[in-house]
Structure formats: structure tokens, C-alpha cells
Image (cartoon, rainbow, N blue to C red):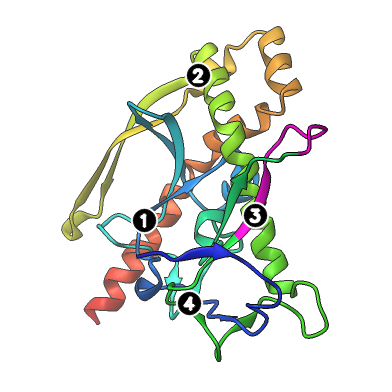
Amino acid sequence: MSNYIALDCVAHQNLKVRNQYGEVFGGNSNHALVFPTEFEALHREYPIFFRHNETSGYYAICILGFDKNENLFLENGHWAARSIPAMCMRGPFAIQLTDNENSLQTDADPIVMVDLDNTRINPDIGESIFQAHGGYTPYFKEILQAMRKIHVGNQSTESFFAILDKFKLIEPIEIKVDLAEKGTYNIADLFTISRERLAALSSDELHELNSLGLLEHCFSVVSSAGNMSHLVNMKMRCLVSSAS
């Protein structure tokens, strides 16, 4: 059960955050929700695909493992990658939007929330949120950057997929991974960007995608599929290690 309250520099001055990853911290998922705002960084290490929900439409995920509750990037409490998906990196923090009564501003003001019941939160061990003489610590500034990616990315997701749908760039894909005697994995209900359709776009369509800042996102998604082989190698090393 979560217990989110607004982060306060006085009441929470001495809070610590265990900056670790693992099953006890809820990091044992074989995929993570990701946003267009982080495609450029994530596509170098993770396969990025789409899924579809009848209620909310398309959304993006990155694949972290093959078995249920398997995250191949977890190693002894650490995340073994240069970039971490923002939804995983944010830990016990979230952003809540509230109505702004200032008529000169139309956007809602984000408030940083902390889950006091999260297993990472404690008074003794880990990273500080606030510096002794005021201001955020370098650790928490990175967390804030991750939450900004989530906030901005969540706002841009619907329009991103609307454009992809407009240009008929989305196509279904099924991933089959054969590990020989170790077994076979089929990952269904995935979508990706059609390489053929992307290559066939007219100059005007390419210009529109580029002017909207979305063309780079498309190339990131397409190129990220190559990371499946890296994920397979990680799985094989894991199987060999567990068997020895």
C-alpha cells in the first residue's frame, strides 16, 4: 500500500533513500513503461516496442527480460546499464498535478510526492534528498530529471502515437527467441514502427515528422530492435551462471 505525501524540505530533511534495485524494491519486472522523451537514451541498450490498450491506446515499453518477474539488468542490487528507464529510476517519488489558480498560467503546477511506506525510504541508510544547508542533493536532482521525462513524456505520448497512426507507421510484431535446449520464448501483443513504411515516406511527411521532433524517436525505436541479441546473450550468461 502506497502512502504518498508532498515532499517537504523541513519535515523530510533527514529522510534517506536506498538507491538500489532488486526484487525487494519492485524491480523484478520483465518490461518497463517508457516515454518518447527517453527513446534517444534508451535505444542504445534496450529493445523498445509498443503495446495497445483498448482504453488508453498505444504506449511504449522496453524489454528487460524473458521470464515473468525477470530483469536481466539487475546485478547485486545495481542496475547494470548506462541509462535507466525513468519509471524505474524515480523510485519512491512521483509528481502530482494540481490546479493553478493563477489566471496567467494555464498549466497545472507539479508537486513532488514521496511514498513514505516504500521500502527504500528510511531515516538512516542511503542517499539524502536535501542538503544540510538547503537545496536538493545531486542524487535527487537526477531523480527530478527522471520525473520531468515522465511528466513531459506522458503529455506527448498521445500526440506521438497519433502521428504514427496518421502515417500508418505502426505494425504488429511477434518476437520469438530460441535458446536451443534452454527453451523458446514468444513475446506476443507487440507493435513496432514499420521499416518499409518509414523508408517510403514522402519528403513532406518526413519534414512534418522532423519538424515535430518525432523523426528521431522513430529511428530510435527501429534501431533498438537490435538490442534483442544483446538481451539473449545476457539471458544465456544468466542460465550458464545458474547452472554452474
Q: Which residue is mark 1?
A: 232
Q: Amino acid at mark 3?
A: Ile
Whether the magenta-drawn stretch holds residue 139 is answered as: no
Of 237 and 197, which appears nearest the observer? Answer: 197
Q: Amino acid at mark 1?
A: Val
- State the SS at label 1: helix
Q: Which residue is mark 3?
A: 111
Classify 10 Å Cα crowding around label 1: few (below 14), some (14-19), many (20 and above): some
Q: Decide if residue 144 is on the left or right side of residue 61.
A: right
Residue at point 74%, 32% (across, down): 106
Residue range of the region highlighted in magenta in the rendering: 102-112
Residue 166 against residue 178 in the figure, above or below = above
Name which of mark 1 and mark 3 comes first in the sequence: 3
Locate residue 35, reporting x and y percent.
55, 42
- State the SS at label 4: loop
CA separation, marks 2 and 4?
A: 41 Å
